[in-house]
Amino acid sequence: MATASETSAELDLKTLHDVRNFLRTCNDGCTAPPKPGAFTLFNFPAVPKNSYDLVFEGIYLGQASAALRLDVLKSLGVTHVVNASLGTKFNQTNTDADFYKDAGIDFHGIPALDIMTFKILPYLRPAAQFIHKAHQEKGVVYVHCQQGVSRSASVVLAYLMLHWDMSLMTAVRTIRQKREIFPNEGFVKQLCMLEMEIRKGAAS
């Protein structure tokens, strides 16, 4: 198990602090009082106003409910789906490539749970590459979990960091202009780790 000092060495603590504080504000400028512990489904300043939102060029971020409706996806022109809550457990969505096959939609799944201890970091680069390939093909991607605020938001943030050269804070601000997002505490830390990995890769 990593020690506290080892974990801190892998994080930019200022970025972690800044992102945490920014996520505690609402999109309309209101400020929520700091709350202890993780950002969870029932512990964030404001729920998204919409089931889904166009948060970046060719990328919709939203709830599972829309991902289960092929008619909705068709109306949005969706060509690719990323399910960041793949599975049959509570708060997961049980879809696969076969579910979208007849609609001609490509599928990528991540068996994530929206808990602080879930290791989402290993899944972020493959998901970002899937989105990047879709973008290169002029496709439209629907990225979702259950509520479209934590797991799926983490995936889109990683994509912007890896393929649009954004810092984590810039990526968070970019998405929050379009949709209320609240990755849980563990995911924020892992996104900070990803940022450090990207920096080290650029410097080598």
Image (spheres, rainbow, N blue to C red):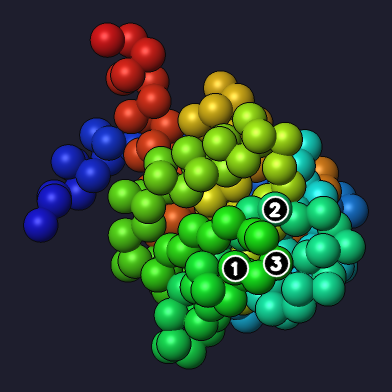
Residue furthest to the left in view is 1
Q: Is mark 3 on a helix, strand or loop?
A: loop
Specify few, some or many for label 3: CA neighbours under 10 Å numbering under 14, 14-19, or 20 or more.
some
Q: Quadrant of residue 64?
A: bottom right
Residue furthest to the top in view is 204
Amino acid under disc 1: Lys
Residue 96 location, x and y as percent?
50, 73
> Left or right: 167 with respect to 104?
left
Tell me the number on the disc at residue 103.
3
Residue identifier under label 2: 79
Q: Quadrant of residue 81?
A: bottom right
Give the mark toward the camera: 2 or 3: 3
Residue 35 location, x and y as percent?
58, 68
Kindly identify the residue that appears in the image at 82 percent across and 63 percent down: 74
Q: Does 82 appear above or below 197?
A: below
> Left or right: 188 with respect to 204?
right
For the residues labelled 3 and 1, say whether their Cβ atoms are less than 8 Å apart: yes
